[in-house]
Image (spheres, rainbow, N blue to C red):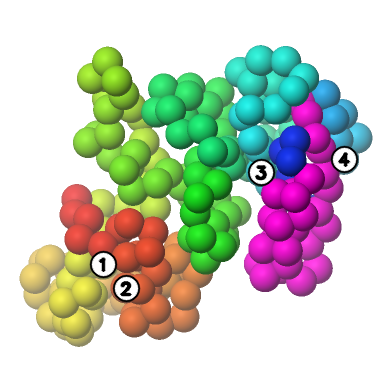
């Protein structure tokens, strides 16, 4: 796996490199300290899997930098904003320009790894406060948000938290037991865990506990 970390603070780049080693020991981490270097790396390296991008970097307006990166990178490459700036309007705009998620720099390493794993699996990550139609910007306009789980998977997760078996969940949701098993498997994969207990813990850490459709 190849990751481009674009941030103008060397200490943060080094710390993120260490976190990424926990995701994949074979990961190749490229570094950029501004948008010019990030775009150059994207043009030079054709097999980048994910870009972890700080918005507040030198090299021009972040909107133009992000848009250019999205144009240069292959469609399969995921761009995730990792920033201390969490203005909802900026996050909304970044998503509209092609970002696949937003991770606050204040997030724990576990949350960050789970979010990156989700994005690499094709999902979209936003902090809990920005998920769903409940998130609004300062003008009251509803922001477009991504979901870690589908509405049905959120229902299954809620029942998992109650300790219900697949058979009980199937009865409550009026689904076949085999369908419930598929949803549980999808939840475990999305949260990057191996069992139900860890799924409940990971969901709580990601702010998904109690979320319903």
Separation of residues labelled 4 and 2 (CA atoms):
38 Å
Separation of residues labelled 3 and 2 (CA atoms):
27 Å
Say few, some or many: other residues with alpha carbon within 10 Å of mark 1 (under 14 / 14 to 19 / 20 or more). Answer: many
Q: Report helix, strand or loop for mark 1.
A: helix
Left or right relative to 116: residue 30: right
What residue is drawn where x is 67% and y is 63%? 19
Labels 4 and 2: the sequence-earlier one: 4
Residue at numbered disc 3: 52
Whether residue 9 appears in magenta in the rendering, the answer is no
Where is residue 210 drawn, in percent x and y? 20, 61
Residue at numbered disc 1: 157
Bounds of the magenta span? Answer: 10-35
Label of residue 200 in the image:
2
What residue is drawn where x is 39% and y is 28%? 88
Q: Report helix, strand or loop for mark 4.
A: loop
Labels 2 and 1: the sequence-earlier one: 1
Circles 2 and 1: CB atoms closer than 8 Å: yes
Q: Which tag is nearer the camera, tag 3 or tag 1?
A: 3
Separation of residues labelled 3 and 4 (CA atoms):
15 Å
Q: Give the camera-side residue of 172 and 8.
A: 8
Where is residue 11 drawn, in percent x and y? 75, 50
Label of residue 139 in the image:
none
The quarter of the picture where residue 173 lies is bottom left
Where is residue 206 drawn, in percent x and y? 39, 59
Q: Report helix, strand or loop for mark 2.
A: helix
């Amino acid at each position: 796996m190849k990751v481009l970390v674009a941030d103008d603070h060397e200490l943060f780049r080094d710390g993120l490199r260490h976190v990424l080693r926990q995701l994949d020991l074979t990961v190749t981490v490229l570094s950029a300290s501004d948008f010019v270097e990030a775009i150059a790396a994207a043009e030079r390296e054709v097999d980048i899997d994910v870009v972890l991008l700080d918005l507040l970097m030198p090299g021009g307006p972040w909107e133009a930098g992000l848009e250019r990166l999205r144009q240069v990178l292959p469609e399969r490459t995921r761009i995730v904003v990792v920033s201390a700036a969490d203005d909802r309007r900026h996050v909304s705009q970044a998503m509209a320009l092609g970002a696949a998620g937003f991770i606050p720099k204040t997030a724990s390493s576990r949350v960050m790894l789970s979010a990156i794993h989700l994005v690499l699996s094709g999902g979209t990550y936003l902090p809990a406060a920005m998920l769903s139609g409940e998130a609004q910007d300062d003008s009251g306009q509803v922001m477009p948000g991504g979901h870690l789980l589908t509405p049905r998977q959120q229902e299954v997760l809620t029942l998992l938290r109650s300790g219900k078996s697949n058979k009980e969940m199937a009865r409550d949701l009026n689904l076949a037991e085999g369908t419930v098993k598929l949803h549980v498997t999808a939840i475990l994969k999305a949260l990057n865990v191996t069992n139900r207990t860890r799924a409940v813990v990971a969901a709580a850490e990601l702010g998904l506990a109690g979320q319903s459709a």
